[in-house]
Image (cartoon, rainbow, N blue to C red):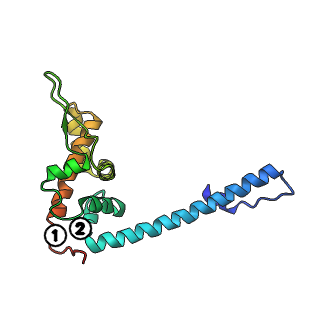
Amino acid sequence: MIEIACRVRPATTAAGIETFTVLSTLRALARRIRALEAEATDHEHAIRRIVRSWRPDLLDLRGVGPIVAAIVLTAWSHPGRCPSDAAFAMLAGAAPIPASSGKTVRYRLNRSGNRQLNRALHVIALARLQHDPATRAYADHRRHQGKTDRDIKRCLKRYIARQLFRQLEHPPTSATTAP
């Protein structure tokens, strides 16, 4: 649709001024969309280069792209910021919060923490649920145990936070650090 809108050539003779204005605006918006898409692609390539120069091992993890890796690296900041994976999970808002009542023992999502980092964990969890057979099998297993999709995603986020923390704190020996 954007391609067609870019090629629209409004003519004032065949249509009224309203139609001409609508078609002109449509064409201008379509061209602006194309320009913004190209700009976003350029920014994504630049971010990918930065992440590859600092921590290329993050891009090897399933579900982690350049934008998500940049968000994780920005929130993590430096080794030692978080003393444990539990602290990193709390920073990400992925630590389980007890929400028990009486004889019922359950946990709820943590609503605090770095929302961008939490969103990055959410994106990773969704990508793994869609494309990783092991994650899908885990979700099916937990569903048969009576867990809701929300609880399954909470558990996945906590697992991903633990995995990212370990990856960040103990990088592979081939990873280079930024000067």
Q: Nearer the viewer, residue 141 or 14?
A: 14
* Residue 170 pos. (x, y %): 14, 65
In this rendering, is residue 7 above or below 134?
below
In this rendering, is residue 25 above or below 152?
below
Q: How many other residues sit within 10 Å of disc 2, few (<14), some (14-19) or many (≥20)?
A: some
| Label disc, if present, on residue 57 of the rendered structure | 2
| Label disc, if present, on residue 67 of the rendered structure | none
In this rendering, is residue 163 above or below 94?
below
Q: Amino acid at mark 1?
A: Pro
Q: Amino acid at mark 2?
A: Asp
Residue at left offset 24%, top offset 47%: 157
Residue 84 relative to residue 129: left or right:
left
Residue at left offset 14%, top offset 73%: 173
> Can residue 96 be seen in this snapshot?
yes
Contact, mark 1 vs mark 2 (Cβ under 8 Å): yes
Farthest-out residue, right: 13
Residue at left offset 52%, top offset 63%: 37
Q: Which residue is mark 1?
A: 172
